[in-house]
Image: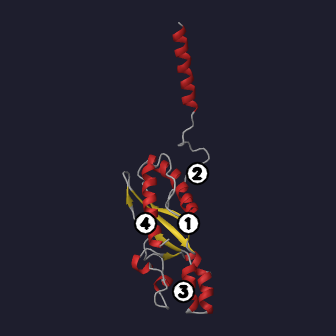
Amino acid sequence: MRRITLWSLSTLTTLVLLFSYHTSTSSKGSTVVPPVIAQAATPAAVPTPETTTSTDGGASTPSGSSGTATDTPSDTSTPSSSSSSSSSTGSSSSSSSSAAKTYAGDAISTRYGDVQVQITVKSGKITASAVLQVPWNDHRDQEINSYAVPILNQEAVASQSSTIDMVSGATYTSDGYIQSLQSAIDQAHL
């Protein structure tokens, strides 16, 4: 009788603890933001006049060889137009080095789909990181990646390298993200 009572109390305690455990898939406090699909990722979609012109014979970035570096339109409209109007040859090379450029990493195939990362670099620092491709096939992919991708983006900007922590529950996405991030960092020569 004593063993049965002890067994039933331990079973009841285990069930209470099991049902009171909060998992990381709960949507408490997190916002669901779908990733941006890579419609503007093609080099032809974004004008790249400053990345392809070089007046001093080699001071420009090697973006012409990789084909993935582009100037962001929001940053180049104000600063480069005012700096290039003052002097056409001297400030075009300095404004192109301080203008924000984007670099798309390789698309890494994972078990559930491709993962591709794009970084924005300004003055030698990563200022933003975003996914161009991420598995988004079913509800579970959407749930995992809408939680994991913002965390990975924040960690990439905070660490300024591909040495970031993986997100628990999103191992394949995290692994593909880190490999694609390293590819983008290599292209940016950081």
The label number, if any, that marks residue 60 in the structure image: none
Q: CA distance from mark 2 to mark 4?
A: 28 Å
- Which numbered disc flags the more N-terminal residue, 3 or 1? 3
Q: CA distance from mark 3 to mark 4?
A: 25 Å
Q: Is residue 40 visible?
A: no
Q: CA distance from mark 1 to mark 4?
A: 15 Å
In the picture of the structure, the residue carrying the numbered disc 2 is: 31
In the picture of the structure, the residue carrying the numbered disc 3 is: 93
* Residue type, label 1: Ala
- Per the image, label 3 sits on a secondary structure element best described as helix
Relative to 95, residue 30 above or below: above
In the picture of the structure, the residue carrying the numbered disc 1 is: 128
Horizontal and vertical percent for residue 114? 39, 58
User: Horizontally, is 112 left or right of 26 in the view?
Assistant: left
* Residue type, label 2: Thr
Q: Residue at x 53, y 50 (%)?
A: 147
